[in-house]
Amino acid sequence: MVSSANHTNGQMEAKEILRQHIAKTALLTDQEFDHLFSHFKPMSFKKGQVIIDEGDQVDHEYFVISGCLKAFYINDEIKMYILQFAMPTWWTSDYGALYNQTRANIRVDCITDAEVLSISNADREKICTEIHQAGHFFRWRTNRGYLASQKRLLSFMNNDTKARYEELLNLYPQLYNLVPKHLIAAYLGVSRETLSRLYNSHK
Amino acid sequence: MVSSANHTNGQMEAKEILRQHIAKTALLTDQEFDHLFSHFKPMSFKKGQVIIDEGDQVDHEYFVISGCLKAFYINDEIKMYILQFAMPTWWTSDYGALYNQTRANIRVDCITDAEVLSISNADREKICTEIHQAGHFFRWRTNRGYLASQKRLLSFMNNDTKARYEELLNLYPQLYNLVPKHLIAAYLGVSRETLSRLYNSHK
DNA sequence: TCCAAAATGTGATCTACATCACGTAGCTAC
DNA sequence: GTAGCTACGTGATGTAGATCACATTTTGGA
């Protein structure tokens, strides 16, 4: 199901990407960062591979190095709603299952081939007690996710589908060519037909 | 604008409410909790009072002891969208403005008379470095807010207005008698007319 | 106690979007 | 190559909810 990334180049790059990502928010010494990084495990996935499935026990969260994942919920085995397109430097998991130690009801899989760094919930908590700045970083990171979710909620209440579609492509221009249109519809919360009509009408 | 709560009874109660709230998630000694609590400032507000206004500088977050606040966004000075009804033991603020040190665009005011405990962003960060379990608590708390927001987003995409209305009243049964209906509509993201028709039709 | 403002109910009409139905193009697998 | 699957386009029709308009009730101040 999962194979470790073993090409040294990829690992070095991943480490640097994580370092720069954290450096934007928290100041860690090289030693502190090395200690933190030692708890992450690099992983490679193929397009379509499932990282978290319905009902799984969830112990890890994932930091995206390359590629694109999706975190999604499926209702009654019929309708799919995408909670997040996880692009490079985003974190993803089923945070409900992870924090409350319940079974997953959010799923995560790969839209493209992807490289990620994984860390267990226990290791993250441990690091946060060992390195204050790491604690600061993770509080900030969770708050950032909260704000993104809140912003999207507002957009949902305030804007129509067309505006939300343009907002999404503005945020992630790569998305248009990267992911099938019906997934974009599942993110916007509209039917694929409506989305199709949307960008074929005014062009 | 703001008056400190000076009735000793109220203060004792507030301290106990916060203690029990934190105890559910983190283990603090009495000394640690006293230290933490010393950074909180009790405040009393009257119904209708504004705690955070558009454009304010935001330095504090608020823990609700009694009463009900609302955190909301107003679009084009016309439409109001309620992000949160802050009931006892909930935390609220404009977390975007608080974390990023930008001006408030989320407002917070009082639906009823209310007692809260306020703490500054700086003090919270300081405490998190001083007391590991406090850091654990605040990471958990932010994650809880994130999950609530995510759940509401899913509900928005998946359910119609009636289902969301029943979901809300199920979560906060007190709300029906406590807040005007047009505020409930502003939380559900529908017009007050639609909400009115909703519960007058099937009764 | 009474008045003005806010909250609520209800009809008529309009519209964005869902749903169903069907057709085509393009991949992938053997 | 071709069978089958997935992605995508597009018409017809139904419906939840927005919006406008106005009546009625409730509430909070002076």
Image (cartoon, coloured by chain):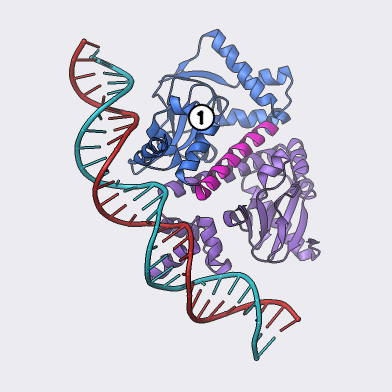
Chain colours: A purple, B blue, C red, D cyan
- Screen quadrant of the C terminus of chain A: bottom left
Where is residue B101? Give x, y as percent.
51, 38
Dot 1 alpha-carbon crowd within 10 angstroms: few under 14, some 14 to 19, many 20 or more? many
At 58% from the left edge and 55% from the top edge, which residue is drawn?
Answer: A82
x then y, percent, for residue A88: 63, 58
**Left or right of A192 in this view: D28:** left
Q: Is residue A113 magenta?
A: no
The N terminus of chain A, quarter of image: bottom right
Compared with A108, D28 (above or below) is above
Considering the whole magenta stretch, tell me its main secondary structure: helix
Relative horizontal placement of residue B76, taking residue A31 as reference (left or right): left
Q: Mark 1 falls within which chain?
A: B
Question: Which residue was labeled with disc 1?
Answer: B86
Residue sitting at x 76%, y 59%: A43
Q: Kindly identify the amino acid type of the residue bearing the numbered disc 1.
A: Ala
The span shown in magenta is: B136-159
